[in-house]
Amino acid sequence: MAASSPTPRLAFVAAATQVARAARSALEQRYGSVPPAQADIIVALGGDGLMLQALHRHMRRGTPIFGMNLGTVGFLLNTYKQTGLLTRLRKARRVTLSPLRMRAVDSRGRKHEVMAINEVSLLRSSRQTARLEVKIDGRMRLPDLYCDGAMVATPAGSTAYNLSAHGPILPLGAGLLALTPINAFRPRRWRGALLPRASSVEFAILDPGKRPVAAAADSVEIANVVKVTVTEAIDIELTLLFDPEHDLEERILKEQFAP
């Protein structure tokens, strides 16, 4: 458990839904609470969107986050239950993740830097297909990719948008990133690539005036990009806590055998 004392200081954050807010009130009354900046552990109540929001918001603090599902899918969360929380936290397994760092330049020459826990995605912004040039570690790999878009996904994010785009599921310890096209038109047979986690992926948008492209790091979108570079942010570590029976590694493994 993350706390240095027998009883950790807990902060509760909740989604905007009525059920999540009610749960937060009940848990704060039962266990007490402190502001997130003073907490040993943050307990997130909601769905995967709220969990990602909490991870982004507290990214620089490195405070462990234990999520309880009061949303829809809840892939990154544990089962919600009011009782026994301190025991669950004491027995919880830690998963450490590093986010992706997206550096983008837009058509006005403005530079943007945004972090992504699941994926960095590029998507066409008009009826025209996007034309992308793809370099890996400075070496040209695809000089002209016609597609609806492309993405770089982390292992934790490989079961999300990446999987919907027919990308591979990556075990947490694989040391890989997934480079996945979205509806590739040419080269038609290209289905993506597995890259070492230390790779630098550079996208150049070809003909951005006629074929505009937006880039998104999780939920943060930058319009009209002309160049996007994606690397793993090895200087940042995120810690998630899971009940042993809901371990993230096991969930990712199960997804590979889902019917």
Image (cartoon, rainbow, N blue to C red):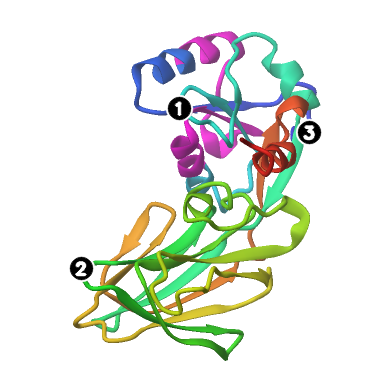
Q: Which mark is residue 126?
A: 2
Q: Earlier in the sequence, mark 1 or mark 3?
A: 3
Relative image position of residue 238 (x, y in whole percent) = 64, 49
Q: CA distance from mark 1 to mark 2?
A: 31 Å
- Which quadrant is home to the C terminus? top right
Indicate the amino acid at tag 3: Ser
Q: Secondary structure at mark 3?
A: loop
Q: Amino acid at mark 2?
A: Ser
The residue that disc 3 covers is 4
- Image height of 87 relative to 62, above or below: above
Q: Are marks 1 and 3 in contact (CB under 8 Å)?
A: no
What residue occupies the far front of the structure in this picture? Answer: 189
Instruction: Identify the mark nearer the N-term, 1 or 2.
Output: 1
Mark 1 vs mark 3: give the one in front.
1
Q: Which residues, given as a range, are shown in magenta?
A: 25-54
Residue that badge 1 annotates: 72
| Residue type, label 1 | Thr
**Figure check: 225 above or below 254:** below
**Residue 85, position as x, y percentages in the image:** 67, 16
**112 and 186: which is toward the camera:** 186
Other-residue count near label 2 (Cα within 10 Å), few / some / many at <14 / 14–19 / ≥20: few
Residue at mark 3 to residue at mark 2: CA–CA distance:
53 Å
Instruction: Please state which of the two labelled residues, at mark 3 or mark 2, is closer to the viewer.
Output: 2
Residue 68 spot, x, y in % from top left: 57, 25
Dot 3 surroundings within 10 Å: few (below 14), some, or many (20 or more)? few
